[in-house]
Image (spheres, grey):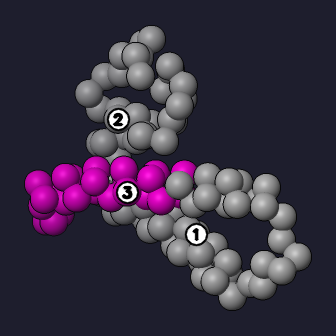
Amino acid sequence: MPTINPLPERYRSIKSSITDSTPLVIDTEANPQDILEAALQRIRASSQLLETLHCQCFKHGDVQDIPHITHALYLLTQDGCDLLTVAQQRMMGWKAPV
């Protein structure tokens, strides 16, 4: 998707964004531990939602709920993966403080 205002290299847009501008970005210069924690938070939420769905009976469910659930899972998982990629890149060059 074309970007209206290109971002400085420091900020990376998330892949789940569907707009021409980039309202949600990852600060690639943030503390790698903070980036990792944000990633884990999203992956954990996605995993917990899947676990809840796995335990549910869909006998009384609505077919219209399926796209809503899958969209939420996509957003959480994709954002988590984008954050993990940045954390990995940062930590590979990261040195422990003295």
The image shows residue 83, relative to residue 27, as above or below, that is below
Q: Residues within 10 Å of mark 2 (few under 14, many from 20)?
A: some
Task: Please indicate whether residue 66 sits to the left or right of residue 51 in the image.
Answer: right
Give the residue at mark 3. 81
| Marks 2 & 3, CB-CB < 8 Å contact | no
Vertical order, 24 against 22 (above or below): below
- Mark 1 Cα-neighbour bin, 10 Å: few <14, some 14–19, many ≥20: some
Q: Is residue 34 visible?
A: no
Residue located at (52% from left, 62% from top): 42
**Percent x, y for residue 20?**
50, 19
Q: Identify the mark nearer the N-term, 3 or 1.
A: 1
Q: Name which residue lies at 83% across and 71% down.
A: 61
Tell me which numbered mark, 2 or 3, is placed earlier along the sequence: 2
| Closer to viewer: mark 2 or mark 3 | 3
Query: For this view, does 23 lie left or right of residue 91?
Result: right
Q: Which mark is residue 16?
A: none
Instruction: Tell me which amino acid carries mark 2.
Output: Arg
Q: Residue furthest top?
A: 4
Residue stretch in magenta: 75-98
Task: Give, as a three-letter code, the residue at label 3.
Answer: Cys
Q: Quadrant of the C terminus?
A: bottom left
Q: Nearer the viewer, residue 1 or 9?
A: 1
Looking at the rendered structure, the kind of residue marked 1 is Ala
Considering depth in this image, is 75 or 27 the residue closer to the camera?
75
Q: Where does label 2 land, which residue?
A: 12
Q: Main secondary structure of the magenta part?
A: helix
32 in relation to 27, above or below:
below
Of the image marks 2 and 1, the number of the one nearer the N terminus = 2
Residue 52 spot, x, y in % from top left: 67, 81
